[in-house]
Image: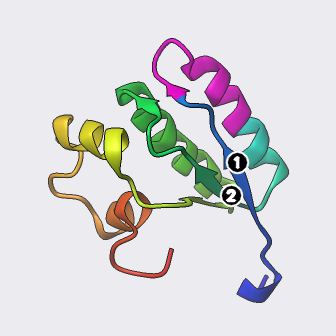
Amino acid sequence: MTASNVKEDYLCLPDNLTVRAITTVQQEVLRFIDKNQSIAIELSDDCQVDISFIQLMEAARIYAGTAGKRIALKKPASGPMLDVLQRSGFLEGLSAEDAKFWLHQGGIQ
């Protein structure tokens, strides 16, 4: 499939992306991945995020990749999400693929 034939859909996630709500968010993300070929995840700038959301996104990337699908963040990580990535040490030694996904660095996102 050529890039011009790929339709990218957006999934707007709720503001609570913490362990208390992550099961519901996980189900929503999986359903969306299953229904779409190319997915962009949209988050509000002031959403509540903890490490469970970072883990969910990493698992979703693997899941989408094994199904031959593309997943991306609509905007680079910022605010609370960037803070969690930094505090968890996740940004240390990022691969080029991880930097592209989380920070939109190193290529077109």
As drawn, the label of residue 39 is 2
Q: Residue 58: x and y, percent?
A: 45, 43
Residue 54 shown left or right of residue 39 in the figure: left
Query: Closest to the observer: 30 or 85?
Result: 85
The label nearer to you, 1 versus 2, is 1
Q: Quadrant of the N terminus?
A: bottom right
User: In the image, is residue 88 above or below residue 38?
Assistant: above
The type of residue carrying mark 1 is: Leu
Give me the C-alpha separation between circle 1 and circle 2: 7 Å
Query: Closest to the observer: 47 or 91?
Result: 47
As drawn, the label of residue 11 is 1
Query: Closest to the observer: 18 or 44?
Result: 44
Circles 1, 2 touching at the beta carbon (< 8 Å) = yes
The type of residue carrying mark 2 is: Ile
> Any magenta on residue 101?
no
The image quarter containing residue 30 is top right
What secondary structure is found at the residue carrying circle 2?
strand
Residue 39 shown left or right of residue 45 in the figure: right
What secondary structure is found at the residue carrying circle 1?
strand
Tell me the magenta residue range. 16-29
Residue 25 shown left or right of residue 9 in the figure: left
Question: Residue at coordinates 35% horizontally, 28% vertically from top-left?
Answer: 51
Crowding at mark 2 (Cα within 10 Å: few <14, some 14-19, many 20+): many
Question: Mark 2 or mark 1, which is nearer the start of the sequence?
Answer: 1
Q: Residue 59: x and y, percent?
A: 51, 39
Q: Residue 107: x and y, percent?
A: 41, 81
Q: Residue 54: x and y, percent?
A: 41, 37
